[in-house]
Image: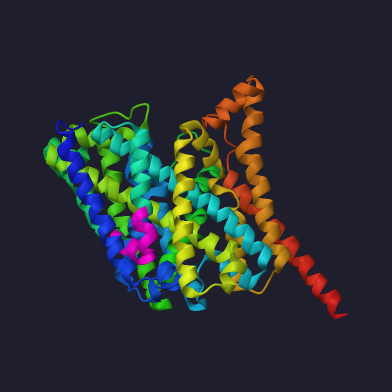
């Protein structure tokens, strides 16, 4: 991609070194667990808004969404930017103020406070799996970018990518994460507008560029999609991302509850505005270069085709920024759940200095776990990635009902989560496997299709998991109610 890989490598190394330096600088003031995970609860709305934007505007947005929009038109943009912008607004209304006012450290703290220890452990364990998988996905994307940029084997770049993220995240915690997010968001914004400007120049002006967009690209409905599939495709980004530790940690770091809400709304506006840039790139760029067999390479290859070396380097820096800002948040989420919730007995007895040291150790462990997943092979990663929505609907149902009402006790939350995991196992693994075998594939071949993500997916699987979780919650709540009534008698 570059004629002078050594010079490019030096520029990338300088950029990465700056990120590490920022992390080490802010690590000086991290003396307690509250400092490490919540920056002392003293962050203003603007840094939080920029950090939320940078965290969510990750590799799946910059690389994945542009390719999805190029392939499917606006139907590929339902998650990015529309769905996630709506989610940020909903977080501000329904979640941010309540969680910040109650002073939690993690999402699982709510379950311990509102329900019981068992649901806390289940939530923490599920979120550890989900966040580790997402960190692995980002590390794979970063390794792919470095491999394409420098021509170095992906196995080497994966080690380097992991080491960089682990070093600056483990030392500084959330304050280093937020500050580097602000830097990375600026670089990312510049990089996105550089490639958009290049497209405008290539087509000879804004009007000429927009004229290439075809009417067939401007529908939000997928081709041949049923109404269930349409609702599900909106529910996954909006509801499926409503309860995430990566966002919660920003809200909980705010100086007060109104600041958390203001930051959420500002992040939504920024996300919708700047998320329109990869949307335009996808709609227009496909008329310049078709999406190949590997959709993730669409945007980098388009950039290489349009940009001179200096501007291409700026764009690659933006791409790295998007990936780094998401990965560090994933690692801190895993660390917080393990340290605060899964090791709660040790946590209760430990001093502040010991808690801070434990937080750093678990962050490093999270990075190593993500590396092992990412390095174990693409097909294995795709199989594990099926678990990324396991239990999410159950957690969502329990939070939305439990946060705003007294309905339901310990059985309600736990049963909702367990029911969701069971349904996810069926819809994401057993049902696609059975469908592949029904189409004539042998068991071994069907397993291969499942691992590769090519087995038929059950339509509306996320809506089904929400329905199952809601039913299980209500049944558990009614049994809880009768048990309390019997105890009174």
Q: How many marks?
A: 0
Name the residue at 48% across, 74% down. Answer: 352
Name the residue at 18% across, 34% down. Answer: 5
Name the residue at 26% across, 41% down. Answer: 281
**Does 225 sit left or right of 294 as displayed?**
right
Indicate whether 467 appears above or below 354: above
Where residue 215 sits: x, y (%)?
31, 37
**Does 310 sit left or right of 105 as displayed?**
left
Q: Which of the two residues, 372 or 109, is positioned nearer the viewer here?
A: 372
Judging from the image, the colouring scheme is rainbow
Where residue 158 sits: x, y (%)?
37, 40
Indicate whether 282 appears above or below 14: above
**Residue 212, magenta (yes or no):** no
Name the residue at 37% across, 58% down. Answer: 169
**Residue 173, magenta (yes or no):** yes
Where residue 431 sits: x, y (%)?
65, 35
Where are the magenta residues, as a range? 167-180
Where residue 151 sits: x, y (%)?
26, 31
């Amino acid at each position: 991609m570059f004629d002078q890989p050594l010079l490019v490598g030096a520029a990338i190394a300088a950029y990465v070194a700056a990120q590490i330096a920022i992390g080490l600088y802010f690590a000086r003031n991290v003396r307690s667990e509250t400092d490490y995970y919540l920056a002392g609860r003293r962050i203003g709305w603007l840094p939080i808004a920029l950090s939320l934007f940078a965290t969510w505007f990750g590799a799946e947005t910059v690389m994945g969404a542009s390719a999805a929009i190029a392939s499917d038109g606006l139907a590929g943009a339902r998650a990015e930017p529309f769905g996630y912008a709506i989610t940020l607004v909903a977080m501000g209304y329904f979640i941010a103020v309540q969680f910040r006012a109650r002073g939690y450290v993690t999402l699982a703290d709510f379950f311990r406070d509102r329900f019981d220890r068992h649901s806390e452990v289940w939530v923490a364990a599920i979120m550890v799996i989900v966040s580790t998988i997402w960190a692995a996905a980002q590390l794979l994307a970063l390794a792919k970018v470095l491999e394409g940029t420098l021509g170095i084997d992906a196995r080497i770049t994966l080690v380097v990518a992991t080491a960089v993220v682990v070093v600056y995240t483990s030392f500084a915690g959330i304050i280093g994460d937020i500050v580097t997010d602000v830097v990375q968001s600026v670089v990312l914004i510049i990089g996105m507008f550089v490639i958009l400007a290049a497209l405008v120049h290539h087509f000879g002006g804004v009007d000429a560029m927009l004229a290439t967009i075809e009417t067939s690209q401007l529908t939000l409905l997928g081709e041949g999609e049923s109404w269930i599939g349409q609702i599900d495709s909106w529910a996954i980004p909006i509801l499926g991302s409503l309860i995430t530790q990566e966002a919660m940690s920003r809200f909980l770091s705010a100086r007060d509850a109104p600041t958390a809400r203001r930051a959420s709304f500002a992040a939504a506006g920024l996300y919708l505005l700047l998320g329109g840039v990869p949307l335009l790139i996808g709609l227009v760029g496909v008329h310049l270069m078709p999406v190949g067999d590997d959709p993730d390479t669409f945007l980098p290859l388009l950039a290489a085709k349009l940009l001179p070396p200096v501007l291409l380097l700026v764009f690659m820096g933006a791409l790295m920024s998007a990936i780094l800002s998401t990965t560090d948040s994933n690692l801190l989420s895993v660390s917080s759940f393990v340290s605060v919730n899964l090791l709660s007995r040790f946590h209760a007895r430990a001093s502040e200095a010991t808690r801070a040291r434990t937080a750093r150790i678990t962050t490093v462990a999270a990075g190593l776990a993500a590396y092992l997943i990412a390095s174990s092979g693409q097909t294995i990663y795709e199989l594990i990635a099926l678990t990324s929505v396991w239990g999410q609907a159950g957690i969502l149902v329990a939070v939305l009902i439990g946060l705003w009402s007294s309905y339901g006790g310990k059985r309600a939350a736990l049963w909702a989560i367990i029911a969701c995991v069971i349904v996810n196992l069926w819809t994401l693994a057993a049902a696609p496997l059975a469908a592949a075998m029904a189409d004539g594939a042998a068991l071994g071949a069907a397993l291969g299709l499942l691992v590769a993500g090519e087995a038929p997916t059950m339509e509306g699987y996320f809506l089904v998991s929400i329905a199952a979780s809601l039913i299980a919650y209500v049944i558990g709540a009614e049994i809880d109610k009768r048990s309390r009534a019997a105890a009174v008698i």
